[in-house]
Image (cartoon, grey):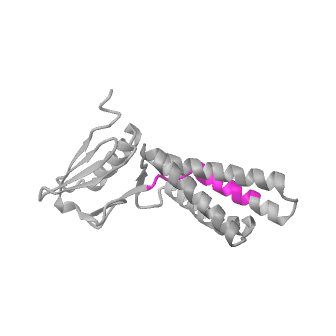
Amino acid sequence: MKKLKNIALQIGLCIILFLLIKLFKLDYFGIYIIISPFFAYALFDYIKYKRGSVGYIAFPREDDSSSQMIALIMGVLMTITAIFYTELNTQKLLLICAGSIIFLNGIFMIPSIRLSIAEGNITITGLDNQIALNQINSIEILSDRIVINKMDEKKHLVRYLELSPKYSDIIEAYLLKHTVQTKIKIANKTSSLTSI
């Protein structure tokens, strides 16, 4: 149900953008050229992430797949529109490039939740603040959430995740690597190793 709401919200935003374009009489070329650098930067970010030159790991939320589908559809529609409905000129070539960049961004999208450990603190997208490692008793990795249990009995939750065993193993390995000198217990309850 939550996925349908997210898809409906994203389609609604696209309709609002379309209406604003019509209302202010903006041409599509200008809009595409404005948004393409953001998608190009996301592709550059993906390349850095795959090379391992960033200080975090990434894993998906429930709505990441719908965001990915929107980018794929938008890229295909933009490219097809440029090929069939515009004259051959510089504008057409730029629209084809912009559509291709958006399409590729849909294919190579980095999951939206990021986890990093630096300077004795853990930071996760979805948590308001960093948490000092020396305040953490245990971390539980489940298929739909991560639970951080602190020494003072408080719990911090990162919810609405979509963790496959592959992603939960990556998270566990990252946490074990960066918490070696602490007494934090890591419990991976969706590991591919536990199902063997």
Dominant SS of magenta comes to helix
Up the image or down, 72 lies above or below 189; here it is: below
34 or 176: nearer the viewer:
34
Above or below: residue 65 compared with residue 116: above
Furthest residue toward bottom: 24
- Name the side, left or right, on which 157 lies relative to 52: left
Of the 4 image quadrants, the one containing the C terminus is top left
- For image coordinates 37% across by 37% down, the residue present is 165
Give how far across and how far down residue 62 sits, in percent.
42, 47
Give the x, y percent position of residue 20: 64, 68
Can residue 43 be seen in this snapshot? Answer: no
How many marks do you count on the picture?
Answer: 0
Residue occupying the point 71% across, 51% down: 77
Q: Nearer the viewer, residue 50 or 111?
A: 111
Q: What are the residue bounds of the magenta stretch?
A: 96-112
Quarter of the image with the N terminus is top left
Residue 151: image quadrant is bottom left
Q: Which residue is at the front of the view, 69 or 15?
A: 15
**Left or right, 78 with reference to 130:** right
Q: Quadrant of residue 154?
A: bottom left
Is 11 situated above or below 189? below
Residue 100 at what x, y percent from top left? 70, 54
